Amino acid sequence: MTERLITSFRSAYSREPEFIARAPGRIEVIGNHTDYNGGTVLGAAINRGTWVALARRGDGIRRFASEMRPGVVELRAEDAERRTGSQSWVNYPLGVLVAMKSSGIAIPAGFDYMAASNVPAGAGLSSSAAIELSSALVFLQAAGASLTREALVTLGRKAENEFVGVPCGILDQGVSCFGRVNHLVYIDCRVPRFETVPLPASAHFWIFNTHTKHALIDGLYAARHQECLDAAKIIGVPFLVDATPAMLAAAETRLSRTAYKRAHHVIDEIARVEQTVAALRAGDLAAVGKLLYTSHRSSRTWFENSSAELDFLVDCLEVEKGVYGARLTGGGFGGAVVALTSDAFGQEGAARVAESYLSRFGSRPEVIHALTDDGAALVTAGRSAG
């Protein structure tokens, strides 16, 4: 991918890039909508990512291009307005620049920029965090600045929350930044605190991307966020991570049915994250799988962010040999299902699931066999360094 990106950069700008960075997509293994509620979450950086190449300019012009979009978007350095329509993808790197400047971090005035990615957009694998972090790394390098990994995560989230306008928690950027091969990333989102948890070598992740996406997904995500904040306020805690099942039960008559359901899911889901970490440390993948199924049913019933397509995939996977567990991954309302499997589940099983889906919905899901990978880093001679 690095060589392809360099070729695309040369084609667009007739010169060589100075800096290249890569950040991986991520799987939300468990912890659905717990991050912005102050809870814990467990994710995996995967071997799909976004690469960004950049070369500085001395004239204050910023030119943005992407292999995924036609044309070049040219802006003056002082132009920091949100883009719309076919240029809206630029809001991710532009949002990083705005966040850097507002945080007092040096930024390059002018540059040529090219992005390439093999993270499917809209699949719940956080292509947005991947482009934010890879962009931040080349911008920092071009400006002669540096940040800790914790600060890099905060910067990416700030860009998405305040400029792009998606009220995500810290899961996406945190996992993309702190990923490690053969490990999962555990995040205590309130502090935040990041650590890695070993994943047994026999474990595999299979992603089934439905290519479906609710037309109102951004609004639905924001609505769930607000419903959780409302529930916490009525229960009498700052965030739902502070609430116990007993506190929820005591507040049930004061909560709307919707607020109760959202809180029910989040409180139980935070507990499931801790149970999953304990099961992983014990090497008990069967127990992890049961927790994944329980998580999906909670998302479907209590958080109401699943879909007929996602439910069907989970039901199909549950009867396949070698599948420990499966659940929706990411924000929901469409997107993808992730399955945790043993070696006994492979291409043949994945093809059966895809064929069943095709028969039911008339389209075939994209199937990705994902491996864990390292987190965001500068790229040197085709290898990650950082």
Image (cartoon, rainbow, N blue to C red):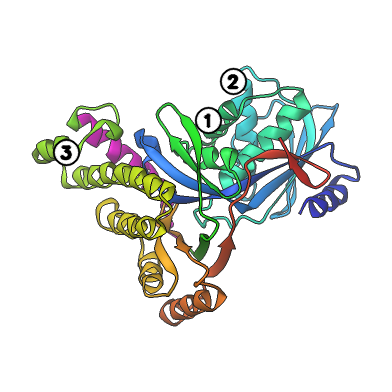
- Identify residue for label 1: 158
How far across and how far down the image is residue 304, in percent?
A: 29, 55
Front position among marks 3 and 2 = 3
How far across and how far down the image is residue 17, in percent?
A: 84, 40
Circle number at residue 102: 2
Q: Report the front residue among 293 and 210.
A: 293
| 223 falls in the magenta region | yes
| Neighbourhood count class around disc 3 (C-alpha, 10 Å): few under 14, some 14–19, many 20 upward | many
| Mark sitting earlier along the chain (1/3) | 1
- Identify residue for label 3: 248
Magenta: main secondary structure equals helix
Q: Is residue 88 above or below residue 160?
A: below
Quadrant, the N terminus: bottom right
Figure quadrant of residue 238: top left
Q: CA distance from mark 2 to mark 1?
A: 10 Å
| Neighbourhood count class around disc 1 (C-alpha, 10 Å): few under 14, some 14–19, many 20 upward | many
Q: Report the front residue among 339 and 357.
A: 339
The kind of residue tagged 3 is: Leu
Q: Which residues are magenta?
A: 212-233
